[in-house]
Amino acid sequence: GRSQRRIRLIRKQKKVDLEQVNLEIINPETINQKRVNLERINPKQVSWEQKTENSHLDSSNSNEQELLLSDILPFLSLPAQKILQLLQAQTAGDYSFVYLQRQVRGASRGVKELIRRGLVESYLEPPRLARPKLQKAVILINDLSENELTSRQQEILAVLRRRGGELWQTELLQACHTSTSTLKKLAQKGCILIEERERLRTEHSPQTGEDLTGEQVKSLTPAQSTALATIQELNGYAKVLLHGVTGSGKTEVYLQAIAPLLVEGKSALVLVPEIGLTPQLTDRFRARFGNKVFVYHSALSEGERYDTWRQMLTGEPSVVIGTRSAVFAPLPNLGLIILDEEHDSSFKQDSPAPTYHARVVAQWRAELEGFPLVLGSATPSLESLISAIGEQGDWKQGNNKTHYLSLPKRVYSRPLPPIKIVDMRLELQQGNRSIFSKPLKAALLNLQEKRQQGILFIHRRGHSTFVSCRSCGYVLDCPNCDVSLSYHHTEPGAQKLLRCHYCNYGCAHPPNCPECGSPYLKFFGSGTQKVAQELSRQFPELRFIRFDSDTTRRKGAHRQLLSKFANGEAELLIGTQMLTKGLDLPQVTLVGVVAADGLLHLSDYRASERAFQTLTQVAGRAGRGEDPGQVIIQTYNPDHQVIEAVQNHDYQSFTNTELEQRQVLNYPPYGRLILLRLSSPEEIQVQKTAQAIAAVLKSGSGFDVLGPAPANVLRVANRFRWQILIKFAPDALPQLPNWEEIRQLCPQIVSLTIDVDPLNM
Ligand code: ADP
Ligand code: ZN
Ligand code: ZN
């Protein structure tokens, strides 16, 4: 439901005021003829000549020189004429602009002309609200004895009986190869009732049913049992951190915690980071709870969203699986919220305002409504860890309202995969300039030969791919943002495209350098496309599937690509961040990380935490089934603390070091942050405003002010961005500045967003 531009006739002007219409080129003769015609049609109409003659005497009359709309047609341009005729022919005198564009050549010129003459107006129609979808249902009400019915009629009743006495008409017709007239006859006999009923667009039709045979209730491992028992003993609000290594069976714990709730008539909410992993997760939940499971995320159509919403309001016990905004789902009798992969930064909304973190909202909701909140992760965020183990770091005891539960082993005691770190500096010294190191090449060849399956992870952030001139070093930049353009491989033979990942600006790849004219433009970086090209070149027989934001844009694409992979149609799944989030693909034996370095050198204080989480999660995709897995991480920084901790699967030593550093610098989870984001099309204005605000802030006490500083990428979509960071101890809350006063320092042209507990800086 997007808002749509529409064009409509201005009603009061069925008759047209000539002066307002402002026809400049008037052929007096034609007008005279018009006048004659008009008089003939409508004798009361004052004659044109009289009017003009008298107008100098009585100026108040001068506006009454009226003609019918159709009379001025010949004076308009051809497109304007056609548009006017179309609008007049339609009762409401109203069409969407898109429709007019399809019908009339030069429509936008025509519309402009008509608007200028005050004949039509253009308006934005608000998005159309969704409505219940009604469909005919056939209900069996009276089983007549067989001899009163034809065999066709008997068949229909038999089908109805088999399907519980009720079926949608379309499906009944299909099943019996019959027509509506046969149904009508049955209705006349009083056998059936045909009635319009609401049909949920979210209804799960059995045809799309996945193979769910492998999904039965499992007998739990001891660690799982302890975790489940603890959750089930909770009464009212409590927070639980379920820290389970990858493949330890957290999802099984969720499933078994939810089952008894549904029996009690309560609902459960399961929040996940991305749609990418919902098809798999949804399937597992559907296998257990059938049509009680609903998904709720931004990729739903307006109608599906509306129906899910209505379904939730009924209060029927259900399981809603959704992304961050689902935390607001209107479930009247919620009994549990689960936040899976709770460390994931997509639970935070940065824009548009209001900014919020789904974990925080979930906690408020659980406290208000009095039920437990379960946070699950293999790599808990430091915030959740601290709240569970306390600032003293007592891993065993936990603290009063947060329970720390741990699943330290994989199910069936499967080992975590061994992780090999490859020093890319040595590879280069040994003359290997390829993006694949020797060990990774060998592993890929092995996959290809043995037809085993693997995952290749590529870290990418907007400007990690770019096109540069090899002669003069010129880099092709986005004209609206301070980032370089990325190269997009399109269909073979089609024009090569460059695109901006921030504002979506696109242009053709130029044949020569715009600066020096050299034809040697080279593509740098390791986006998925580059890796895909290299794979095809070096391993022509290896089949791979790209799984990234480019290939998963279409609805249902996630599911399709994953099931292709599961069916063995490729040996390798290559992609970005999306691959790290909870995929459970038991047949994967190899995980390769092309370059870990992009992750290690991000410019905010959370870089290490994020790098550790991402690498641990991606490594955790290997060896989840019966065949053991292996992980290969390529890097130029093999001695980095994060790399070492990942290699040793050592969450605890990583967090100990990281927490120490955070404490020294008073960063979260010890200190707290507020980020002021300023942006404006006026570069000087935004900078001045940022400086003015920072000066006022710095006069306060009880908190530190960092900045003002230009944002990581200064200009995005032609807006210049500056930021100011406020750092304070949790007990300094009362000393914080008066935000209304701060806002008043902002001129109209500068916009200010206040982001409390910012994640993405
Ligand atoms: P996690 O969410 O912790 O990464 P999953 O819940 O996806 O782990 O479990 C990993 C795999 O182990 C899944 O295929 C799941 O079906 C299986 N599994 C989980 N618990 C058990 C159990 N108690 N016994 C046998 N298999 C299990
Ligand atoms: Zn050049
Ligand atoms: Zn841009």
Image (cartoon, grey):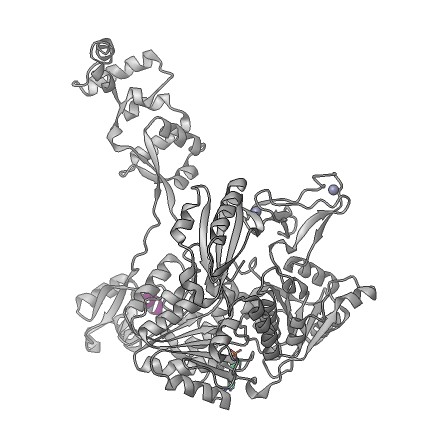
Range of residues picked out in magenta: 171-175
Q: Nearer the viewer, residue 559 or 682?
A: 682
Q: Position of residue 365 (x, y in %)?
A: 35, 70
Q: Is residue 174 magenta?
A: yes
Q: Position of residue 533 (x, y in %)?
A: 69, 59
User: Residue at 44% of width from left, 54% of height from top?
Assistant: 352
Q: Is residue 761 visible?
A: yes
Q: Nearer the viewer, residue 479 or 65?
A: 479
Q: Is residue 760 magenta?
A: no
Q: Is residue 619 above or below residue 21?
A: below
Q: Nearer the viewer, residue 30 or 522?
A: 522
User: Residue at 54% of width from left, 67% of height from top?
Assistant: 666
Q: Position of residue 391 (x, y in %)?
A: 50, 77
Q: Quadrant of residue 459?
A: bottom right
Q: Is residue 688 above or below residue 130?
A: above
Q: Nearer the viewer, residue 230 or 5?
A: 230
Q: Is residue 137 left or right of residue 365?
A: left
User: Residue at 53% of width from left, 80% of height from top?
Assistant: 393
Q: Is residue 621 left or right of residue 239?
A: right
Q: Is residue 717 visible?
A: no
* Rendering quadrant holding ligand 2: top right
The secondary structure making up most of the magenta span is helix
- Farthest residue toward the bottom? 222
Assign the C terminus to one quadrant of the image: bottom right
